[in-house]
Amino acid sequence: MYSSELIKGTLKTIILKLLSDNDKMYGYEITHKVKELTGGKIQLTEGALYPTLHALEAQGILSTDVVNVGNRIRKYYSVTPNGKKVATEKVNEFSEFLDTMIFLLDLQPKLG
């Protein structure tokens, strides 16, 4: 599992990319998908996820849709048209950052 410092610095990028690829998702679904995709190396906590989702919503990057599921209300998050642009920018920025860190730390990319 990676440190919370690393995850905190990449959380917005992770959320935006995941939502861009999956139309709409609810909070638990996001945490479960990230854990599944990373083989448990990244486990998002509710304490980190929901404030980030709410901040992205307040910035107009995400929109929400509230749906009644049985006796519960489920809040689905999706990326707005502006959010799609922001998601692309975040992913590109992170990719360039990785390239810079690989160079700076003189690392050899791992294969497989």
Image (cartoon, rainbow, N blue to C red):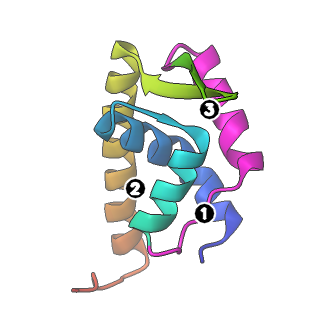
Residue closer to the observer: 68 or 58? 68
- The type of residue carrying mark 3 is Leu
Q: Residue at x 66, y 71 (%)?
A: 3
Total number of numbered labels? 3
Query: Residue 6 has which mark?
Result: 1
Question: At numbered mark 3, what does the secondary structure look like: helix, strand or loop?
Answer: helix
> Which residue lies under the disc numbered 2?
97
N-terminal-most mark, 3 or 1:
1
- The type of residue carrying mark 2 is Phe
Question: At numbered mark 1, what does the secondary structure look like: helix, strand or loop?
Answer: helix
In which quadrant of the rendered image does the C terminus lie? bottom left
State which quadrant residue 17 falls in: top left
Q: Position of residue 13 (x, y in %)?
A: 46, 44
Query: Residue 53 has which mark?
Result: 3
Residue closer to the observer: 81 or 70? 70
N-terminal-most mark, 2 or 3:
3
Q: Residue at x 67, y 26 (%)?
A: 54
**Residues in magenta, as a range:** 39-63
Q: Residue at x 32, y 54 (%)?
A: 95
